[in-house]
Amino acid sequence: MQEKELSAYAVTDVEDIWYLTNIDYSPEQRPFFLIIYPDKKPLMLVPKLEESHINVDYFDYDIQTYFDVTSEVGQNWYEVVTKKFDGLDKIGIESNALLEITAKAPTVDWQPNDIIKSYVK
């Protein structure tokens, strides 16, 4: 992250999240994020309905939930994730992220790259 000068890095692939956290969970149809910052605890952004599935005590992270189908303005995943990146200069995202994710939060300047993939190999 330092080399790429990233303010945050978003991980969305379930295998990559498992590799980094040992949380073995696969969300059904809703986006699930691990956001890594260079200077604070990682953040898990998950659907409210699935919060209990990723609540573990062996990985130190913050958690924030979002509402899915019944969300009010400002509570859906793409508005919540966009708020998490407000004020940050450069946000990386793994190159295998779904287009649905990168297209749905258009105010985020995503920088696709293979930081995680280069370590997972």
Image (tube, rainbow, N blue to C red):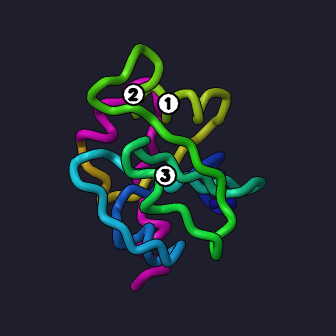
Instruction: Give the residue type that dot 3 points to.
Output: Ala
The residue at the far top in this view is 73
The residue at the far right in this view is 39
Say the numbered circle drawn on residue 76: 2
Q: Residue at x 49, y 30 (%)?
A: 80
Say the numbered circle drawn on residue 10: 3
Q: Residue at x 24, y 43 (%)?
A: 99
Q: Residue at x 65, y 35 (%)?
A: 88
Q: Is residue 2 left or right of residue 121?
A: right
Q: Tell me the residue that label 1 is attached to.
A: 80
The quadrant of the picture occupied by the C terminus is bottom left
Residue 41, magenta (yes or no): no
Q: In front here: 67 or 111?
A: 67
Residue 2 in the image: state x and y as whole percent. 69, 60
Q: Tell me the crowding category of disc 1: few under 14, some 14 to 19, or many 20 or more residues within 10 angstroms, Cα based.
A: some
- Which tag, 1 or 3, sits closer to the chain's start? 3
Residue 5 in the image: state x and y as whole percent. 65, 52
Q: Nearer the viewer, mark 1 or mark 3?
A: 1
Q: Tell me the crowding category of disc 3: few under 14, some 14 to 19, or many 20 or more residues within 10 angstroms, Cα based.
A: many
Q: Is residue 117 left or right of residue 29?
A: right
Helix, strand or loop under label 1: helix
Residue 37 in the image: state x and y as whole percent. 66, 53
